[in-house]
Amino acid sequence: MKKNCIECGDEFTGRADKKFCTTDCRSSYNNRLNSDSTNFMRNINNILRKNRRILAELNPDGKAKVHRDKLLDRGFKFSYFTNIYQTKQGKNYHFCYDQGYMDIDHGYLILVRRQSYVE
Ligand SMILES: [Zn+2]
């Protein structure tokens, strides 16, 4: 059965379930896939770490009130966080690791630091 290698595009003859002309092509294809997902995860981890650092810098005393523009100026990305903690009053804190914030009025945020782990 004639097929085209999904890595290099060369034509080869093989069983129906064979996708690569050689083991080299198979391993370079798999290596690239793995490194793409590694890069993707690394980028997200970097964003989360940067978010955490920004929150920590703006919150040296463990509690602070800042305008969200201050975070945006430093490159904070609001769509990235590690988890949400909901208080009994139904308010949501967004956390980047141990550093969290809660939206209050007029674009202001309350910054908090988590003392112990909360689910
Ligand atoms: Zn090939």
Image: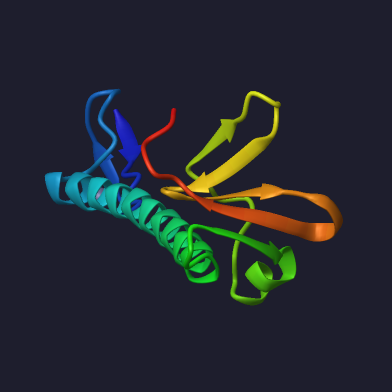
Residue shown at 41%/62% (left/top)?
Answer: 46
The mark total stands at 0
Q: Is residue 97 left or right of residue 18?
A: right
Q: Position of residue 95 (x, y in %)?
A: 52, 46
Please say if 30 is above or below 111: above
Q: Position of residue 73 (x, y in %)?
A: 66, 76
In this view, the residue in front, 48 or 33, is 48
Residue shown at 55%/33% (left/top)?
Answer: 85
Q: Position of residue 96 (x, y in %)?
A: 48, 50
List the single residue furthest toward the left.
23
Where does the N terminus fall, quadrant-wise?
A: top left
Q: For residue 19, what is the image quadrant?
A: top left
Where does the C terminus fall, quadrant-wise?
A: top left
In this view, the residue in front, 60 or 20, is 60
Residue shown at 13%/44% (left/top)?
Answer: 23
Please say if 11 is above or below 18: below
Which scheme is used to colour this image of the protein? rainbow
Please say if 78 is above or below 12: below
Q: Position of residue 7 (x, y in %)?
A: 32, 50
